[in-house]
Image (tube, rainbow, N blue to C red):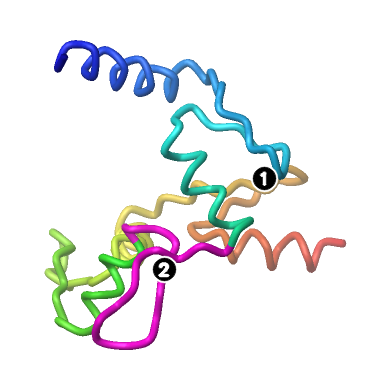
Amino acid sequence: HWQDSYESNLTEHLRAHTGDKPYQCSQCDKAFSQNRSLINHLRTHTGEKPYSCSKCDEAFSHKYVFIEHQREHTREKPHQCSQCNKDFSYKSDFIRHHRRHSGEKPYQCSQCDKAFSHTTGLIVHKITQT
């Protein structure tokens, strides 16, 4: 029934907000709120890459990475900055760019008050602080 499927999807969605993570990885200590997230994670252990590009020899373990990769071949850039109209193929590049406009720095050092707009900035900071 569609109602059972809807309720199941809603239950899994709500877990993301409650922090409940009943899907435990048998290979490591990670746990997930959604079964599909566990299935995707397991590919990091198995090396499975079910998404193959027909235009080159690359294969991918996650569908969203495969879809973004295809944009390299099509030159599609669906993510546009509303402030400067620059276009991006990858959502992650768009988010990183947007932080330049907003000044957002979501990566906080746990040892001091410094914050960074990219994870790499925080990683370099931690390395230089030790």
In the image, 35 versus 77, the foreground residue is 35
Residue range (magenta): 47-64
Task: Give the amino acid at mark 2.
Answer: Phe
User: Magenta stretch: residue 51 in it?
Assistant: yes
Residue 51 falls left or right of residue 24: left
Mark 2 element type: strand
In the image, 55 versus 118, the foreground residue is 55
Q: Residue at x 78, y 66 (%)?
A: 127
Question: Mark number for residue 48?
Answer: none
Quadrant of the frame with the N terminus: top left
Q: Residue at x 51, y 60 (%)?
A: 118
Q: Which residue is mark 2?
A: 60
Q: CA distance from mark 1 to mark 2?
A: 38 Å
In the image, 23 versus 87, the foreground residue is 23
Q: Which residue is mark 1?
A: 113
Q: Main secondary structure of the magenta part?
A: loop
Quadrant of the frame with the C terminus: bottom right
- Residue 6 at what x, y percent from top left? 21, 17
- Residue 68 at what x, y percent from top left? 28, 68
- Which of marks 2 and 1 precedes in the sequence? 2
Question: Can you tell which of label 1 and label 2 is closer to the viewer?
Answer: 2
Q: Residue at x 35, y 15 (%)?
A: 11
Do tag 1 and tag 2 residues touch (Cβ < 8 Å)? no
In the image, 52 versus 30, the foreground residue is 52
**In which quarter of the view is residue 25 placed?**
top right
**In which quarter of the view is residue 74 placed?**
bottom left
Residue 119 falls left or right of residue 105: right
- Residue 99 at what x, y percent from top left? 36, 57
Q: Residue at x 23, y 19 (%)?
A: 5
- Residue 62 at what x, y percent from top left? 40, 58
